[in-house]
Image: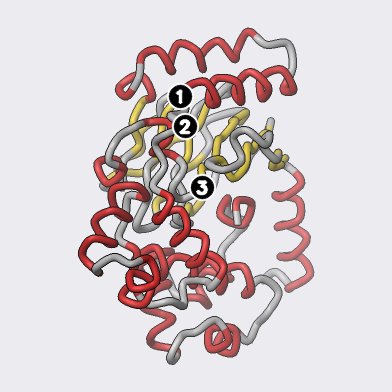
Amino acid sequence: MKTADEDFSRRLTQMAQINYKEIRPGAAVRPFIKCFWVLESNSPTALPQTIVPDGRAELLINLGEPFQQETKGQWYSQPDIFFVGQITGPFSVRPNGPVRTIGVRFRPQGASRLLRLPMFELTDAAVPLGDISQRLQSQVNRLREADSLFEQLRALERIVMAAADKSNEDRLVSAAVGQLEQANGLIGVREMANCLGLSSRQFERRFRNVVGIPPKLFSRMQRFQRVFQSMEGNANWVDVAVSCGYYDQAHLIRDFRQFSGTTPTALLAEEFDLSRCFL
């Protein structure tokens, strides 16, 4: 049986094999892009990795071997370039060889500026970018020709900036997203709608159209994220949950099961997973 020190050492070794970094976007795209990120590993662990919801859509470009994703008990290779809409529950991925992935993490309301679609149509979906826009697919695919990561990211920012519809912003939804993020989801839907001068139904419809999920579910994700982050290195997750606005232990476990597929104790006992990189 391994000791706690041996287990910790093994997890550090796995982390060292994965190089993950975030790059702040330029000022022109910062209103709708949270960050660019890069994930690289020549010898990734073959264990399945858990991805949990964070309330943001992403564009992923696999320049190495695409990850495999589990769907209904079967493993399938992800597309080379694809868009991931809002996810409402956990899913598992595993590397299929050397990893070199570039990601665009949008702000919750940001992807609609680029895709110009009702975002709820892409919820819980991973869609090849070419199925949405052949033009964007062709432009992004040319990143492979760039000489360096710097050039790839600079070209990607230019592509996104040129494609974004600068007039397609619902300012009320953007304001609501900002307030819900700042409050870690601890604002009621009716209260938020009243602040914006909308009925609850109007607010929910506009929010779902722009963000992809209802505001109540988005709020729950923000609260879950705060607990998920705070639990690292803190064994007393019950106290953490109370401080983050959960009523009791059962309330917390319900959200954890929906968003991570397991309980807080079981999640902390898992091997290193990609969620800990991204969050």
Mark 1 or 2, which is nearer the eye? Answer: 2
Question: Residue 115: in sight, yes or no?
Answer: yes
* Amino acid at the residue labelled 3: Arg
Q: Nearer the viewer, mark 1 or mark 3?
A: 3
Whichever of callouts 1 and 2 sits on the residue coming sooner in the sequence is 1
- The answer to which quarter of the image holds residue 25 is top right
C-alpha span from label 1 to label 2: 24 Å
| Residue marked by disc 3 | 107
CA separation, marks 3 and 2? 15 Å
Secondary-structure class at tag 1: strand
Q: Tell whether 253 sits left or right of 40.
A: left
Q: Residues within 10 Å of mark 3 (few under 14, many from 20)?
A: many
Report the disc number at residue 166: 2
Residue 160 image point, x, y percent:
53, 26
The secondary element bearing badge 3 is classed as loop
Q: Amino acid at mark 2?
A: Lys
Q: Name the residue: 70% across, 40% down.
A: 24
Which mark is first along the chain, 2 or 3? Answer: 3
